[in-house]
Image (cartoon, rainbow, N blue to C red):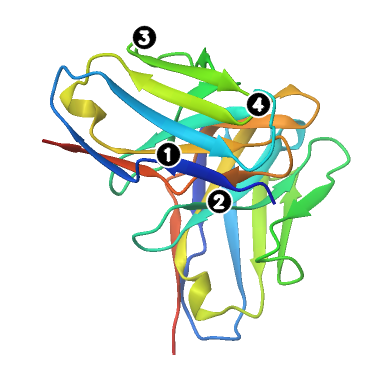
Amino acid sequence: EVQLVETGGGLIQPGGSLRLSCAASGFTVSSNFMSWVRQAPGKGLEWLSVIYSGGGSTYYADSVKGRFTISRDNSKNTLFLQMNSLRADDTAVYYCARARILAGSYDYFDYWGQGTLVTVSS
Amino acid sequence: DIQMTQSPSSLSASVGDRVTITCRAGQTINNFLNWYQQKPGKAPNLLIFAASRLQSGVPSRFSGSGSGTDFTLTISSLQPEDFATYYCQQSFSSRTFGQGTKLEIK
């Protein structure tokens, strides 16, 4: 059974750093595209980042480029999101999601974690 | 970034109604369009991928159509469990979501 479990959220002061983890089971993280998506309170979904299978190329939304870093640990079958220089508008529930590839880099998110809440506030 | 615009933003309907939600892309995205359902406090759930392909386990009352820039999600006969928020998402160029359509009980 495919499962994704995010951890690492919490309350952090503006300017601080936090690392989110997404532990996967039932499939191999390194063999799949994996993404992070967030949802600010009462708002819609915002895609943040993807790490491709194999070589692990990474891409980011403009809103987090240069501040957030996606990575994975193949030995732990875990995805990470390192978040630096956090701002109040980064407050959101953060989801990791597995992406299935249909063609080229076209993908869709077929499994999601339950989400972890990050609150940026002084 | 490709902007995705859903309409309406909210919708009231009754059990048994046929409902259609529209998603328009800012540029052509071929058929690289997915639809998700999200209930309060839960993660999104994939309904449709590649514009019209039903995800395994999703009831057949859900259907999708469209290509290029204009897409629709149709629920043929609303059930009580369908009241939720629906999002479209493109992955033709990077990935972006529509702003969501909240489907409420009339």
Image-based side of B37 in relation to A107, left or right: left
Image-based side of A96 in relation to A56, left or right: left
Q: Do labels 3 and 2 share a chain?
A: no
Q: How crowded is mark 3: few (under 14 residues within 10 Å), some or many (20 or more)?
A: few
Which residue corresponds to mark 2? A37
- Mark number for residue B60? 3
The CA distance from mark 3 to mark 2 is 27 Å
Q: Looking at the rendering, which quadrant does residue A30 occupy? A: top right
Which residue corresponds to mark 1? B44
Residue sitting at x 21%, y 21% = B78
CB atoms at circles 1 and 2 under 8 Å apart? Answer: yes
Q: What residue type is labelled 3?
A: Ser
Residue A87 in the image: x percent, y percent? 55, 80
Q: How crowded is mark 4: few (under 14 residues within 10 Å), some or many (20 or more)?
A: some
Single out the mark in the foreground, 3 or 4.
4
Q: Looking at the rendering, which quadrant does residue B91 occupy? A: top right
Residue sitting at x 65%, y 80% = A85
